[in-house]
Amino acid sequence: MFNKLTGTLLITASSFSVVSAVEKIKWIFICFNLIYVVLAVSVFSFSAESVGRLMLSILSMLVAFSYQCRWCFDASRKVLTRFHGFKLGRKSIYSLQQQNVDYSVIKNIELKEVHNTYKVILHVKESQQTQFAEPISISLKVKQHKLPALVQQCRKELMSQGINVVGQFDSVSRKDWPTFSSVPLDQDTVKAFIGIKLFNDPIKLQYPVTLFMLPLPRQYFHQVWASSYISFMAALFILYSSQNIVAATVVALLGVVVSAVRRKLIYDKHYTQGISTPNEIVISENSLVIPRVYFEDKQVRQIEKSAIKSINIEWNWYKAGDGDGTWRQYRRPFVFKVNIDVSHGESTTLAGQTFDSNKFVIALSQLGYSATLTQIPKIAAVWRFYILIPMAIALLGMTGFGLYSLYIRYLI
């Protein structure tokens, strides 16, 4: 039967399953599709297009319903099955990941809160640790007031099958991530940093570098923005002399576009210098290859994993403010710098905005690189305020000018 108290435990006569937070998301999708089907049937008109949309929605619900990401403890076979894929009943349709663990190798099951996420963690006996490359865990989505009942039910079912259970999601068995601190990069922190991955994506090994996002060489700064300076002065003159807001806006935007094009040309000339070599970071289990654009001597660096002393990743949330646990899940991390310190060699700093740094952090974790995540009190992507603030000022100015025009025309 389905445990109505928690919605996370699935109990039958011969098995006990723990449903993950990822799987429970499917019910939102199913509900929206069900509402659409009901509305579509109520106003149904027989045509190929309407029938096709209805069948597609029903098929989508069946696919979502078959999706599973759970642990199943089979008491009859004494086997824990870790399943992630699509299944109808007991028949597997497509498996993204499936692993069987015999009860004899299980040391205990730990209930632990890790970075504001409730987790059920499998610990195997020391003699069997070589068979498991990484710790096995499953994340739960449970409301706070239902947590004690879930812990009690979970402990009861597991202990009835002879499995030792430790922890109970309390302050004793809790792993926190303090704000603006440094934490080691591991499986728990990378998932809290990036968020829950819905599918097991392959590790990305190559990261193309966006030259346009590299730091602007100081000697080219005024050359790039000269057209913007001129266009803004011309826009102010037009606005003062004729009060033509549209013309002033067009002139100002034209200068910004010219600056953007000039910036692109300068970057291509400065960083490539006519040499068409791949501008991408390459990571493997044994080494890092850093392209020439990050170095003054324009030489490619290959850094062996064994020679890396430390990797420090400076980051902050893209949206400002600390927020609580609910607000945190709607934010995304922004990497400022990846500082690589090499033993008996030069240190290297990679600007986070120049490549897909979030997936690079995942690759560092999964390939076993020793790294540290350091949250710093710095506003992410501060350049966006240079766009939003002038837009807000322009909007206020246009509103004020419009109200003033109405006052002159109708009230005087």
Image: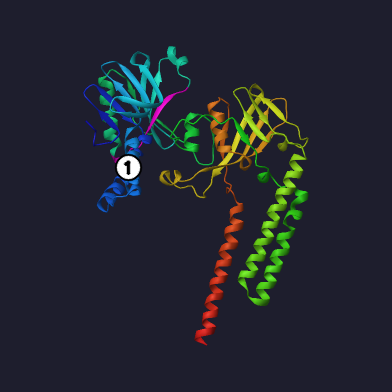
Nearest the viewer among 226 and 254 is 254
Residue 195 in percent (x, y) is at: 46, 38
Whether residue 369 is situated above or below residue 192 in the rendered picture: above
Q: Look at the numbered disc 1 and give the secondary structure of its residue.
A: helix
In the displayed structure, does residue 32 sit left or right of residue 324?
left
- The residue where tag 1 is placed is 55
Residue 159 in percent (x, y) is at: 27, 21
Q: Which residues are magenta?
A: 134-145
Nearest the viewer among 268 and 240 is 268
Q: Is residue 178 visible?
A: yes
Q: Residues within 10 Å of mark 1 (few under 14, many from 20)?
A: few
Quarter placement of the N terminus = top left
Circle count: 1
Nearest the viewer among 294 and 124 is 294
Q: Residue at x 50, y 49 (%)?
A: 321
Q: Residue at x 43, y 13 (%)?
A: 128
Residue 260 in percent (x, y) is at: 68, 53
Judge whether residue 61 is colored magenta: no
Residue 333 in percent (x, y) is at: 53, 42
In the displayed structure, does residue 194 sit left or right of residue 346?
left
